[in-house]
Image (spheres, rainbow, N blue to C red):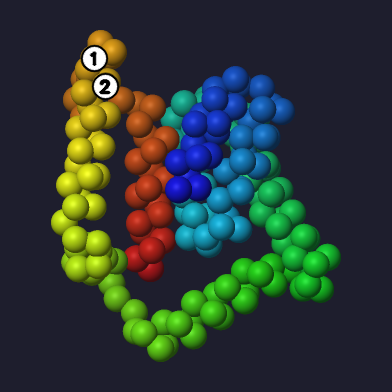
Amino acid sequence: LVLWLILPKYIELSERKRFGTCLLAGMLAGVMFPFRTQLILAGAGLFVASVLFIRSWKLLVALCLGYVLFILLSGILDWVTWGQPFHTLIRQKRWALEAAEMSGISSWYEYVPRTWENLGSGIFVALGMMLMLALIVRIKRHERVSGLFHAQDLYVYLPMLAMFIGHSV
């Protein structure tokens, strides 16, 4: 959810192609990290997608600098609040490991059957309907649909791929 909220603003800021807005876009991507640790890989996916669209190394450095700066700011905030940098992250991981010991762990490919078991087939039907609706809206707007993806879709699919890899490890 965080990725979907941040992604449109990240794209808008990074497309302005100014150092300050790219720095802000990088900080916005860094916001994902405190919410879920695996999203640090989604930020890396955003950077890889940005490399394809932003040709200026100065702007790419601004994106990276903003990203790292926000992660460091979250560590400093924990240091001021709890007396230890990244205390919240460490506590969250300890809690997750304790919960995993109690209930066991599963591979990433077991999420689909468990989701089916807990939520029923309706969730997959709803997701399929949303994807079809997005395709219909795109066609009705007379956007060219060449192949499966537009180049800008990499902003969505690369971070999602990185996030799935992060969940699998």
Residue 4 horizontal side relative to residue 146, left or right:
right
Residue 105 vs 28, above or below: the answer is: below
Residue 8 horizontal side relative to residue 30, left or right:
left
In what element is the residue under mark 2? helix
Quarter location, residue 88 = bottom right
- Residue 137: mark in rendering: 2
Residue 57 vs 144, above or below: the answer is: below
The residue sitting at the top extreme is 142
Which of 167 and 104 lies nearest the eye of the viewer?
104
What amino acid is at disc 2? Val
Asked whether residue 51 appears in the rendered view, the answer is no
Mark 2 → mark 1, Cα distance in angstroms: 5 Å
Label 1 CA crowd tier, 10 Å (few <14, some 14–19, many 20+): few
The percent coordinates of residue 1 (x first, y second) are 45, 48
Quarter location, residue 159 = top left
Mark 1, residue position = 140
Which of 124 and 96 lies nearest the eye of the viewer?
124
The percent coordinates of residue 50 (x first, y second) are 49, 33
Q: Mark 2 near mark 1, Cβ–Cβ under 8 Å?
A: yes
In what element is the residue under mark 1? helix
Residue located at (56% from left, 51% from top): 32
What amino acid is at disc 1? Lys
The percent coordinates of residue 78 (x first, y second) are 75, 65
Residue 164 horizontal side relative to residue 81, left or right:
left
Residue located at (25% from left, 37% from top): 130
Residue located at (61% from left, 48% from top): 30
Residue 29 vs 38, above or below: the answer is: above
